[in-house]
């Protein structure tokens, strides 16, 4: 009886549709691990874990493309620089990776989440019969009214034109599968066109804007787009952390030792002059 109660208490504590396990049995969404091994690759497995079914060949291929495209952006990217800096502090690879992943947010790497929400809102208007120009205009105006100055997924500090974006739009459009809504490529480009209008320099679609269009086309909800970006960038983070761990540099800061920052505080003063307490 006590044994039975223990078992029930355990079963009532957590419940999940994802994994079923008992001695000698591991099943993901109903598929036995020994059936999946050797037949299903990493992107297919990610899809299965998040969506509950195996993807079509086109869905798996597009997910694989989008994951590989945002892996690394060099030590110019705060996440990568942080992975390297952390490694020079002598911490383990998991600490370096976690430090780096923790800065992926609304401004760096995590903009895909809000970007997909924007694309979905434009798409909903188009499905209701509005044309893409007016649907995009209305949703951009709503964002502006709510105080958003930077449209998520657009603008780049380094690239006047992000080379990843047009190629990703090309791959999205070339994917022929009824389950993939390629209209999101048109939406992303329309947003880029409208926010760049009347400016001397265009505001380019960045990797979050481009991968966001693909995640939206694949039907991933906004919050998962950020999670998938983190998953992809984690590969770059791990590579840089690993490379740096094998180098002799120790305790390396964000600036060369000869460089300092701009001091903007109080002019030099003494405690006696001010008459204050030390
Ligand atoms: C990436 C980002 C931080 C780059 O910013 P930045 O290099 O400081 O860009 P600047 O502030 O110099 O922008 C230059 C001009 O373009 C405008 N601009 C830049 N990004 C913009 C965007 N996403 N939406 C609207 N306008 C934008 C700025 O308002 C500025 O206009 P102004 O000259 O009239 O003042 C910024 O574009 C941004 O926050 N984008 C949204 C978040 C995002 O997608 N992040 C992922 C980056 S990979």
Image: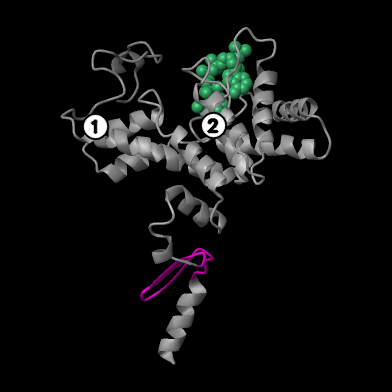
Dot 1: few (<14), some (14–19), or many (≥20) neighbours within 10 Å? some
Specify the quadrant of the image occupied by residue 25: bottom left
- Which mark is drawn over residue 225? none
Dot 2: few (<14), some (14–19), or many (≥20) neighbours within 10 Å? many
Tell me: is circle 2 under 8 Å from ligand 1. Answer: yes
Q: Would residue 27 be counted in the magenta stretch?
A: yes
Report the front residue among 149 and 41: 41
Circle 2 residue: 208
Which residue is at 26% across, 37% downward? Answer: 242
Whichever of labels 1 and 2 marks the residue nearer the N terminus, that label is 2
In the image, residue 1 sits, relative to residue 71, either above or below, namely: below
User: Where, quadrant-wise, is the N terminus in this rendering?
Assistant: bottom left
Q: Would residue 146 be counted in the magenta stretch?
A: no
In the image, residue 174 sits, relative to residue 178, either above or below, namely: above
Q: Position of residue 208 (x, y in %)?
A: 54, 31
Which residue is at 52% across, 51% downward? Answer: 47
Report the front residue among 81 and 173: 173
């Amino acid at each position: 009886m006590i044994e039975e109660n223990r078992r029930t208490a355990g079963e009532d504590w957590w419940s999940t549709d994802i994994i079923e396990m008992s001695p000698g049995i591991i099943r993901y969404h109903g598929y036995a691990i020994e059936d999946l091994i050797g037949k299903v690759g990493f992107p297919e497995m990610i899809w299965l874990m998040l969506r509950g079914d195996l993807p079509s060949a086109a869905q798996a291929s597009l997910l694989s493309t989008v994951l590989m495209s945002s892996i690394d952006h060099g030590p110019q990217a705060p996440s990568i620089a942080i992975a390297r800096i952390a490694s020079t502090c002598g911490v383990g690879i998991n600490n370096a990776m976690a430090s780096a992943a923790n800065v992926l947010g609304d401004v760096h790497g995590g903009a895909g989440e809000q970007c997909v929400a924007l694309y979905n809102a434009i798409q909903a208007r188009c499905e209701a019969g509005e044309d893409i120009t007016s649907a995009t205009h209305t949703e951009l105006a709503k964002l502006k009214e709510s105080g958003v100055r930077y449209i998520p997924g657009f603008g780049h500090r380094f690239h006047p034109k992000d080379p990843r974006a047009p190629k990703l739009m090309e791959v999205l459009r070339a994917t022929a599968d009824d389950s993939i809504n390629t209209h999101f490529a048109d939406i992303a480009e329309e947003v880029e066109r409208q926010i760049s209008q009347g400016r001397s320099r265009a505001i380019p679609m960045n990797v979050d804007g481009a991968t966001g269009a693909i995640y939206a086309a694949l039907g991933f909800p906004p919050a998962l787009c950020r999670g998938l970006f983190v998953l992809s960038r984690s590969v770059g983070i791990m590579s840089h952390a690993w490379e740096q761990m094998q180098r002799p540099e120790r305790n390396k800061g964000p600036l060369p030792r000869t460089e300092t920052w701009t001091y903007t505080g109080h002019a030099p003063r003494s405690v006696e002059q001010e008459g204050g307490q030390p």
